[in-house]
Image (cartoon, rainbow, N blue to C red):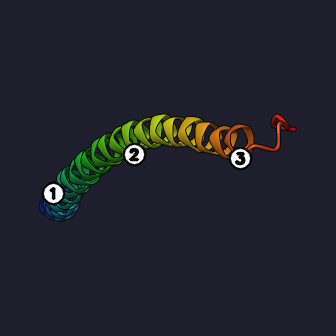
Amino acid sequence: MEMEQRMDRVEKRLDATLKIVQTGMKMLVKMERENSEFRRETREAIHALIESQMRTDATVSALSTQVAELGTQVKALGIKIDRLVDGWIGGNGSGRGRR
């Protein structure tokens, strides 16, 4: 009889251990699923940031080109204005040069 009681206790402990292992496995599966989802979302966010940075770089490059072109146009306009003013000052018969 004592042997049956011991076997019953051993079986109950084994059943309890089995339930703990099963619960642990379920938790591991759930954690792996959540971890996989997190990695996917992180990858998507990183790719979105990379694409955004690439668009920003392209915009900055285009704006830089436009600023350089505007600088050239402003310089040319300044030269034309200087020539025009020099023409007015030198060509009005006053004999005075540009100050």
Circles 1 and 3: CB distance less than 8 Å?
Answer: no
Q: What percent of the width, then of the height, locates residue 18?
A: 14, 57
Q: What percent of the width, then of the height, locates residue 61?
A: 36, 37
Q: Secondary structure at mark 1?
A: helix
Q: What percent of the width, then of the height, locates residue 93?
A: 75, 43
Q: What percent of the width, then of the height, locates residue 76?
A: 50, 35
- Residue at horizontal 54 percent and vertical 39 percent from the top: 80
Q: How far is mark 1 from mark 3, CA to CA?
A: 87 Å
Answer above or below: position of 40 versus 98: below
Q: Is residue 74 left or right of residue 87?
A: left
Label annotation for residue 92 = 3
Q: Is residue 93 left or right of residue 11?
A: right
Q: Quadrant of residue 78?
A: top right
Answer above or below: position of 40 versus 60: below
Q: Is residue 49 left or right of residue 73?
A: left
Residue holding disc 1: 33
Looking at the rendered image, the disc whose residue lies closer to the viewer, 1 or 3, is 3
